[in-house]
Image (spheres, rainbow, N blue to C red):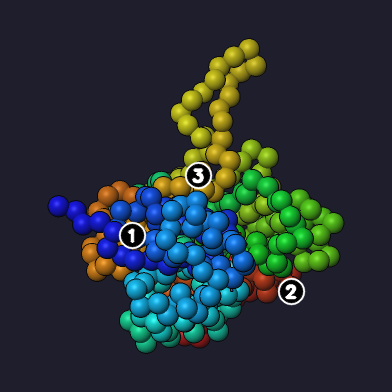
Amino acid sequence: MPQHRELTVGLIGAGRIGSNHAELLARAVPETLLAVVADPVEGAAARLATALGVERAATDLGGVLADPALDAVVITAPARFHAGLVEQAAAAGKAVFCEKPAGMDLEEIERVARAVEEHGTVFRVGFNRRFADGFPQARRAVDEGRLGIPQLLRSTTRDPGLADPAAVAPWTIFRETLIHDFDALNFLNPGARAVEVHAVADALVAPEHKDAGLLDTAVVTVRYDNGAIATAEASFSAAYGYDTRAEVFGSGGMATVGELAASSLRLYGPEGLSADTLRCDTQSMGRAYAAELRSFALAALGRPAGTGPEDPAEAPGVDAAREALRIALACIESCRTGAPVRLPASGAGR
Ligand SMILES: NC(=O)c1ccc[n+]([C@@H]2O[C@H](COP(=O)([O-])OP(=O)(O)OC[C@H]3O[C@@H](n4cnc5c(N)ncnc54)[C@H](O)[C@@H]3O)[C@@H](O)[C@H]2O)c1
């Protein structure tokens, strides 16, 4: 008989993705009891807690992180707070799920790594693409050698719109958007490490914000130490919705993943053929978000991960967080210098 609601969880950061994750923890992950929602902004946590019927809302993050009644925390605060929050939660003995990026720079990632190691923390970073439809299956095809040796990879993120360009922190396109693509590329090219990165980026969606540091469009090439060459690209404004796709091309074949259509419905009429598209990440990635949170809950409970086709070969922990961030940081340097950036194949920064 299945057991339910065994992992008592607190959520830190009741914003856009926090609201999505809170709802999943409360309603879609059978093992989790969402006991508290916390946010330093007065009223933010209370509104979310009320909407979901969560017992407690808090503005005092320290109190929540230290609460002995909580087994785990899910961190959905802005990126610049992630490393500090992970350290506090790990020190308090909680299992930790942290949205990406786990840190803003490699020094922060090493602090996270040390905390996780020192406290034996079950830690996951929110690279949900590993759990998205088709991605685990593509990785399995690579692992089984069905695509031969990976030679070319690509990954795309096109967001549906840029509501407030002024609110986008400089370099967000690399640290918070393309970091998903860098992780997807790493995931689909297992065992290989990025050794060279070249990024080209611009503000094509909101050029008037470029002087303030906005980059909303980017293309990145990544060379790996197994010879594979990858491209990642992002735009903050795709007119047709939310578009995430990836491809691995190898000596023995190719896998492509990512769906643009919102359903199998196709409308045929005098003007031709039409289909609705996925409009936002919470629509497109809804199942992936639920799957990554459930996988985290099972790990925190010491249970084996599922064995379904949607379970990734490798759930994302500190190493995945570090490997994707080092590519993102190299992109920033590449944009600053206009030149490719070499990455150490091993040693420092690993
Ligand atoms: N995996 C994904 O697909 C995905 C999607 C969106 C966002 N994210 C990530 O999630 C994080 C949050 O993004 P968002 O779009 O929800 O942001 P948001 O601004 O909508 O929400 C952040 C919330 O955190 C609160 N907050 C501020 N300071 C805090 C602190 N010190 N501690 C705790 N909470 C604090 C804010 O009041 C706000 O309610 C970012 O790191 C972002 O990159 C991931």
According to the picture, the residue beneath numbered tag 1 turns out to be 32
Using the rendered image of the protein, determine whether residue 113 is visible from the camera's viewpoint. no
Q: Disc 3 vs disc 2: Cβ atoms closer than 8 Å?
A: no
Please, what secondary structure does the residue beneath circle 1 have? Answer: strand
The circle on residue 284 is 3
Q: At 26% from the left edge and 67% from the top edge, which residue is drawn? A: 301
Task: Give the amino acid at mark 1.
Answer: Thr
| Earlier residue among tags 3 and 2 | 3
Name the secondary structure under disc 3.
Answer: helix
Give amino acid for label 2: Thr
Ligand 1 quadrant in view: bottom right
Marks 2 and 1, the one that precedes in the sequence: 1
Q: Position of residue 338 (x, y in %)?
A: 74, 69
Count residues near mark 3 (Cα–Cα under 10 Å), then give few for <14, some for 14-19, many for 20+: many
Q: Is residue 28 above or below residue 94?
A: above
Q: Is residue 282 above or below residue 54?
A: above
- Which residue corresponds to mark 2? 337
Looking at numbered disc 3 in the image, what kind of residue is underneath it?
Ser
Q: Residue at x 51, y 35 (%)?
A: 262
Q: Is residue 84 visible?
A: yes
Residue at mark 2: C-beta within 8 A of ligand 1? no
Q: Between marks 1 and 3, how big is the CA–CA gap?
A: 23 Å
Q: Position of residue 295 (x, y in %)?
A: 33, 60
Q: CA distance from mark 3 to mark 2?
A: 36 Å
Residue farthest to the top, as pictured: 270
Q: Residue furthest left?
A: 1
Which residue occupies the foreground of this view, 134 or 241?
241
**What residue is drawn where x is 47% and y is 31%?**
263
Residue 341 image point, x, y percent: 63, 74
